[in-house]
Image: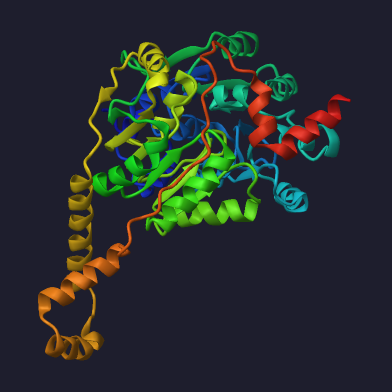
Amino acid sequence: MTTFQELSLSPATIKAITGMGFEEATPIQEQAIPAALQGKDVIGQAQTGTGKTAAFGIPMVETIDPRSGDIQGIVITPTRELAVQVAEELNRIGEFRGIHTLPIYGGQDIKRQINGLRRKPQIIVGTPGRLVDHMMRRKTISLKNIRTVVLDEADEMLDMGFIDDIEEILERTPEGRQTMLFSATMPAPIQKLAKRFMRDPQTIGIKSKSMTVSGTEQAYYEVPERQKFEVLCRLLDVQLPALAIVFVRTKRRVDELAKALDERGYPAEGIHGDLAQSKRDSVMRGFKEGTTEVLVATDVAARGLDISGVTHVYNFDIPQDPDSYVHRIGRTGRAGKKGAAITFVTPREMGLLRFIERVTRHNIERRPVPTAAEAFEGKQQALVESLLSVAGGSDTSKYRGIAQDLLNMNDSVTLLSAALKMLSREKDEPPAAVELTEDRPMRQRKERKPESRDRREFGRQDYEFRKRRSR
């Protein structure tokens, strides 16, 4: 592995990335950074979690003039969450070079963004619709001095219907600019975009035979629709994920499943396109801080999320195509860490699973559903570990008096058993059966219509602006 000291970076940038905990470059960084520093256009095929933000962020920061108040770099992202996360990382990379990055996205107060632009950031990170709004209608962003343009998660932006906005942005940047494009997959429209707007790009990325992340353990369970919820609860008890994302197809399923999990004792929240931005921020904050252990999400609502520490991804509903599968399981097994991706498959969906295996070139292991006894044993073990952790690491002195009184009235085994039962939130009556609204998958298809998800699920403000402008 190459160290960052070997990449001919400035001392200020080395200081910044050392402070961020970076030591050795990831494969995508090792290849992309030298090419970008030479001014070459770069196409990087890489999933999220491979370090691609630093792969384009480090050379961008290195080549920008910190003395200039002009916008010299622009990063286009599919979602507001990704815009914020990329901007935060670029600000950290550029901290000691005096490079300031500003996120621009729909759903944020426009006055706040305009005030931020008045402070002369050198880099803008934004969603396509809001960038076009600032460029075309408000005239608050000028791209005439742009040196570098980055398209981050280009295939996601294609799926969300942003291709026209991207083309309009690129057409308004100087011809001599450097362009970098990063994408987990390379569908034909993205290849066409690259051919039109990039100059002899150097293509780099994953060289392995599989499209999916090697550090992610992949398995599936063949489960009838009506049994999915109970099987998910058993797996949560057996596998004990630290943080888990559960993917479903519809917003209604998000609400139903998150509520059912929470009532069963698993700290869960749902996220989908109908949530207000304040609620969305609250849900994501709870998940990142660990107060929410299970995040239930639709594909589109989860796009652009960059959350460290996700140990498990559960495809409660099988994804409708291989690209979605790749993006979903890319949420775990990040930055060299191990992860697990579990897919529930009904008998009628086995053909779709085989199609995903063929396209991703990865065999997904079939596993037997855990028994109720195995699930109970896993839950017991988790409770014991939790109790021992509190006993060994917390001040319990103020409870000792009442504990002694209870021991004088009851034997210790009975009391400890009752405490474990309370911790498990187990009730005397069996848990109620949960009936979720069944959502059947669409038939396998070769191409998705890019606008459909954007209209149904996400990016309403960006989409509405484009719709008004096209009239």
Most distant residue in the right direction: 471
Q: What residue is drawn where x is 43% and y is 57%?
A: 263
Foreground residue, 266 or 187?
Answer: 266
Where is the C terminus found, in terms of image quarters?
Answer: top right
Q: Position of residue 307 (x, y in %)?
A: 43, 44
Q: Tell me which corner region of the image, top left, top right, bottom left or bottom right, holds residue 396.
A: bottom left
Number of dots carrying numbers: 0
- 442 left or right, relative to 26: right
> Can residue 275 be seen?
yes
Relative side of 97 to 143, left or right = left
Question: Which residue sits at x=29%, y=45%?
Answer: 234
Q: Residue at x 48, y 49 (%)?
A: 258
What is the quadrant of residue 457 in the picture? top right
Colour basis: rainbow
Whether residue 96 is visible here, answered yes or no, is: no
Residue most extreme to the front:
429
Name the image quarter holding the N terminus: top left
Decide: is 336 above or below 264. above
Task: Please give left or right for residue 71 compared with residue 187 in the image.
Answer: right
Residue 370 position in % (x across, y down): 23, 39
Q: Position of residue 357 (x, y in %)?
A: 35, 15
**Relative horizontal placement of residue 419, taking residue 150 as reference (left or right):** left
Answer with the quarter of the image where residue 453 lies. top right
Residue 259, how many percent across, how many down?
49, 53
